[in-house]
Amino acid sequence: MSAQPDRTASVPPLTLDAARGVLDAQPFSRLVGAELAAFEPGRAELRVPLRAELLQQFGFVHGGLFGYAVDNALTFAGGSVLGPSVVTRGFAVEYLRPGQGALLIARAEAVSHSRRQALCRCDVFVQDEQGDETHCAAAQGTIAVIDLAGREPV
């Protein structure tokens, strides 16, 4: 068995514009209207303007949208310290209260990382029309480096 080369050693850091390009390459992110508002080493902020199609039957933000925002915010925060070839290994979300408002904001940070994985935390807020934020969910997840060169084409 031969050793695999370390493909993470020379990965240049992503800029905010490059990270926005990664988000825009995700069809589902375009569908929900997600925007990467901040991206810097160890931190990312994802925003989704809320509309009727993203709510559940009681008018609250759908839990699936919280999960989407957590997943992507965690992955961008992890990717900011690991490089662009990363995937979510897993995450857990605790819903604190229902969300109602105009804008969903997921703020994530890398808490700790090695060369191959990062432990990240995310807080999700819903902002109302006046700009006031309500903390609606908290999450934690692990982001891992993936070797895309060794993957079979999909």
Image: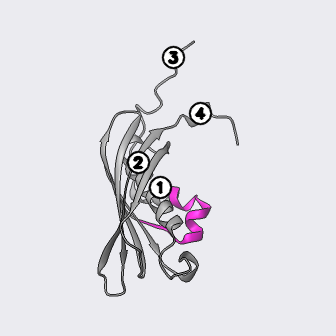
The answer to whether 21 appears left or right of 113 in the picture is right
- Please tell me how crowded label 4 is: few (under 14), some (14-19), or many (20+) other residues with Cα within 10 Å: few
Q: Reply yes or no: does residue 139 show up in magenta.
A: no
Point out the frontmost of discs 1 and 4. 1
* Upstream in sequence: badge 3 or badge 1: 3
Q: Mark 4 points at which residue?
A: 149
* Residue contact at pointers 3 and 1, CB within 8 angstroms: no
Q: Mark 2 points at which residue?
A: 141
Instruction: For marks 1 and 4, give the CA distance.
Output: 23 Å
Q: Name the residue under label 1.
A: 71
The vertical placement of 126 against 17, above or below, is below
The vertical placement of 31 against 41, above or below, is below
* Residue contact at pointers 2 and 1, CB within 8 angstroms: yes
Instruction: For marks 2 and 3, give the CA distance.
Output: 28 Å
Q: Reply yes or no: does residue 28 show up in magenta.
A: yes
- Please tell me how crowded label 2 is: few (under 14), some (14-19), or many (20+) other residues with Cα within 10 Å: many
Predominant secondary structure in magenta?
helix
* Upstream in sequence: badge 1 or badge 4: 1
The answer to whether 27 appears left or right of 19 in the picture is right
Q: In what element is the residue under mark 4?
A: helix
The quadrant holding residue 148 is top right
Looking at numbered disc 4 in the image, what kind of residue is underneath it?
Ala
